Amino acid sequence: MSSLRRHLPSTISWIDDRGSPAPERFAADLDTERSALQHGVALVDLSHGGIVTLSGVDRGSFLGGLITNQIKDVSASRSIYTAMLTPQGRFLWDFTIVDAGDRLHLLTEPDRVPQLMERLAMYRLRAKVELVLDTGNFGLLAVAGPQAGAVLAGLFPVVDAAAPLGSAWTLSESLRVWRDPRHDAHGWRLLAPAAALPALWDQLTAVATPAGLLAWEGHRIRHALPRGGVDLVPDETLPLEAGLKELNGVSFTKGCYVGQETTARTHGRGTIKKRLHQVLLPGGGAIVLPAPVVTPKGKEVGVMTSHAFLENIGVALAILRRSDVLEHADLTVVGVPVTVRLPAWVDWE
């Protein structure tokens, strides 16, 4: 549940997001929120997300053997994005890791957090690591849009608006800010104790337009940014299919981790048959997800996993078999012709 549920105006609407209530929209006109994300600066409540905290002297080495990215890169001045995989190299969880002095915060999706705790506990064995479920104890806010960095630098002079993705700053003992490590469109994040979140929200709403989940999901899909557990399907998706390399979530120079063999082999051989795509649909009809994308003869090329309406057109994300996309220009979804294109941030052939 959002840590701001009791603080936000009673007039806003709420929506279930993966089992947790989140603000659906703030403005009567959704275009106001969309415009802030696309042209200005928006504030998004992500405090319903999952948070797992690791402490203990072995926390770094313990995580290093489980995640796709380099744990040694995490510091007070840098956060990373990473994933955990099955031994066969299939996606399980993704999260951002933030350094908090003697602890590491793993910020992930609101559902499947108990399963993540169980898996971490299973691997812990004799490692000197303590696991704490901190969902609800801390709250995460996003500040996004082309003016986000400048606005945050104006509020907090220590922040460098031009710093690289992943750059992080400790603003106080309990407040941390970082530039999301994945992609510029993800914006910036602030993490604070739940008790401090209302005051921080009020401070930020003086300079940023509040935006709900509808606008935020549309922004994410507009930029073809996959979401763990939705576009990255647990036990199914290979991380490289969904662009985790391009989104700075995979290191090919670190030591061994669970699922590394498959990830390294597919990367080295260039044998990635499926890739993340954007799917454009005409009109505004409802789409039940997941929705198969098929050829004229009914062959399934992949499935749409995320969908939003933007400027009177449907935009979706799907991991599709690349050879079929190149061969067939007349793909359909529920009988409707669609246009398929690659995300702007990739150069896949």
Image (cartoon, rainbow, N blue to C red):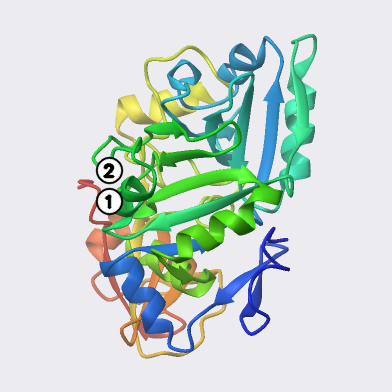
Instruction: State the SS at label 2.
Output: loop
Q: Which quadrant of the figure contains the N terminus?
A: bottom right
Give me the residue at 65% from left, 16% from top: 59
N-term mark: 1 or 2: 1
Q: Is residue 46 above or below residue 241?
A: below
Q: Is residue 183 left or right of residue 319?
A: left
The residue carrying pointer 1 sits among few (fewer than 14), some (14 to 19) or many (20 or more) residues within 10 Å by Cα, namely some
Tag shown at residue 240: none
Classify residue 181 by image quadrant: top left
Residue 159 visible in the displayed image: yes
Instruction: State the SS at label 1.
Output: helix
Residue 105 is situated, as x and y percent measured from the top left of the image, at: 62, 33
Give me the residue at 27% from left, 76% from top: 330
Residue 39 is situated, as x and y percent measured from the top left of the image, at: 26, 68
Q: Which residue is mark 1?
A: 150
Task: Out of 267 and 23, give the one closest to the viewer.
Answer: 23
Task: Out of 115 and 282, give the one closest to the viewer.
Answer: 115
Q: Which residue is mark 2?
A: 161
Give me the residue at 64% from left, 71% from top: 8
Residue 142 is situated, as x and y percent measured from the top left of the image, at: 47, 54
The answer to whether the residue labelled 1 contacts the one labelled 2, judged by CB atoms less than 8 Å apart, is: yes
Could you tell me the amino acid type at mark 2? Ala
Q: Is residue 287 left or right of residue 181?
A: right
Q: Is residue 39 left or right of residue 94?
A: left
Task: Out of 119 and 333, give the one closest to the viewer.
Answer: 119
Residue 86 visible in the displayed image: no
User: Between marks 1 and 2, how big is the CA–CA gap?
Assistant: 5 Å
Could you tell me the amino acid type at mark 1? Ala
Residue 31 is situated, as x and y percent measured from the top left of the image, at: 37, 83
Task: Out of 156 and 294, give the one closest to the viewer.
Answer: 156
The residue carrying pointer 2 sits among few (fewer than 14), some (14 to 19) or many (20 or more) residues within 10 Å by Cα, namely some
Give me the residue at 35% from left, 35% from top: 158
